[in-house]
Image (tube, helix red, strand yellow):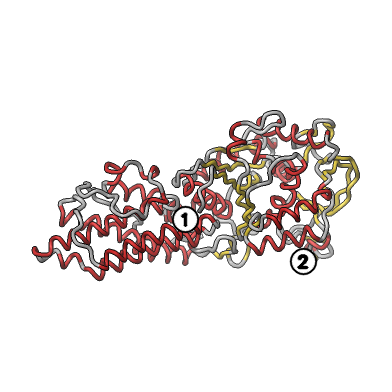
Amino acid sequence: MAAGSSFSVTTPIFYVNDAPHIGHAYTEVAADVLARWHRQSGVPTWSLTGTDEHGQKILRTAVANGVTPKEWADKLVADAWVPLLKTIDIANDDFIRTTEERHESVVQQFLQKLYDDGLIYDGEYEGYYCVGCEEYKQQSDLVDGSGEFEGQYVCPIHGRPVEVLKEKNYFFRMSDFQQRLLDLYEAQPDFIQPDSLRNEIVSFVRRGLDDLSISRQSFDWGVRVPWDDKHVVYVWFDALINYISALGWNPETPGELFDRFWPSNHIVGKDIARFHAVIWPAMLMAADLPVPARVFGHGWLLVGGEKMSKSKLTGIAPSQITDVFGSDAFRYYFLRAIAFGQDGSFSWEDLAARYQAELANGFGNLASRVVAMIGRYCDGAVPAAGELTAAESSIQKTVADAVAAADAAIGRFAIHEAIAAIWSVVDELNGYLTEQEPWKVAKDDSQSERLHTILATAAEGLRALAVLLSPVLPQATAKLWRALGAEAALGALTDQRIPDAGAWGQLPAGSQTEPLEALFPRIEHEASA
């Protein structure tokens, strides 16, 4: 990962029509790991998440529940979306709501600028509209309904019939930016990732872009169009602007945060990548603003072969997992078990198996054994290493290689590859202890120097692991860091620089360890959906 002057990462802002499921949490954790990694690499970092609270879908949900849209949004944000961040240990820098004045005022200023520059005009539109997607659909995007929806066109994402809408709207001249978008994709091949998504988006734009309907008159829950208050702003046009409204942008003075942290990297589900990789950069080009740094569309979480969805009853609340396995295991599982950028299947059986084999038996048991042996054989003080052998040199090389490989993988947003590289240290240290058998060496007083070398090497390896895994497993690594005596000797774990983690010999001899409780306790009962 080449260190830049700053790093900014965003999640989508999520609709508050329902409570979050693990698909939402997956996006949050991925963005959080990237942000934590950069912060701990000494790069000024800013991370944003939030909620999308306008649009017809929210209005209908609120009405169905007998409350106003704002009351519905306030309750969902307070009771579900903000608590989610604590449930899965997200260290975001800001949380933006589209109903906040700081956002709505920027939307109106942005829109007014485009209108004044002749990039918005009025017209009439008729088309197929999916309320779930809050998007007009081409007929080619739809599928024929069956069963109760026989004879109707159905949205393949939501499985519901689309509506035919006809109304007078304002339009953004998005077609003017087709060639500029294609030039962007060619000049920055990594602007859209992964490659499969990039190819899909490029093909879509090459087929030709229509102008975009950006206002609605059929309902009134949204930001008012500044020059015509009979219209509200199309929810996606409104929502995308959150990425700069949260940074304090306005047409006169972009602001310090905007200057420092824009452009951002957008982490989104692949089903909304088109909005972020086509509409949003076209909007920014129209406003003479820099386009995003990158749009990364991750895959879907599948349960029973279907995309995670509350409406299809495949939605699983994150707390159903964290209440049993803990937040660290949640973060680890979804980012290790699924190649970031591809679809991945969730099952309780796979989660339980990986928790036991990789976290409890692999990393957790390694940490417990080493700290316990230092306590038993060295009165709790990390010993000084004596003469090194090829076995110790191999450990040092494995750690150095893991740091380089993991850092490079994070630069590609290949989070699963980064964790796999770090886990090579876990496997190598476990193998090292099995081969060196310090519990046997301890029985021979003449071998005390050798014993100390083995335990010093294992402790230093754990020191590096704590630093490298801190962005992924913040709770377990903080416990390990204290147990190694590293906090007293080296300072706070989050102050340790990841690129320096492979420099050997940082944990001083004499550091006083503390007893370490099991980092990943045995799960005594079966988890179930």
Q: Position of residue 423 (x, y in %)?
A: 40, 62
Q: Quadrant of residue 102?
A: top right
Residue type beneath disc 2:
Gly
Q: Residue 143's quadrant in the figure?
A: bottom right
User: In front here: 207 or 133?
Assistant: 207
Image point (55%, 56%), residue name: 413
Look at label 1 and name its amino acid: Asp
The residue at which mark 1 appears reads as 407
Residue under label 2, please give it: 147
Please provide percent x and percent y for residue 70: 67, 35
Could you tell whether 54 is left or right of 493 in the image? right
- From the viewer's side, name the closer residue of 174 and 302: 174
Q: Secondary structure at mark 1?
A: helix
SS assignment at label 2: helix
State the CA–CA distance, disc 1 to disc 2: 51 Å
Question: Of residues 1 and 487, which is closer to you in this image?
Answer: 1
Say if 502 sits above or below 302 in the image: above
Residue 53 visible (yes or no): yes
- The crowd level at tag 2 (other Cα within 10 Å; few <14, some 14-19, many 20+) is few
Determine crowd level at label 1: few under 14, some 14-19, many 20+ residues with C-alpha closer than 10 A. Answer: many
Which residue is farthest right? Answer: 124
Q: Is residue 69 above or below residue 318?
A: above
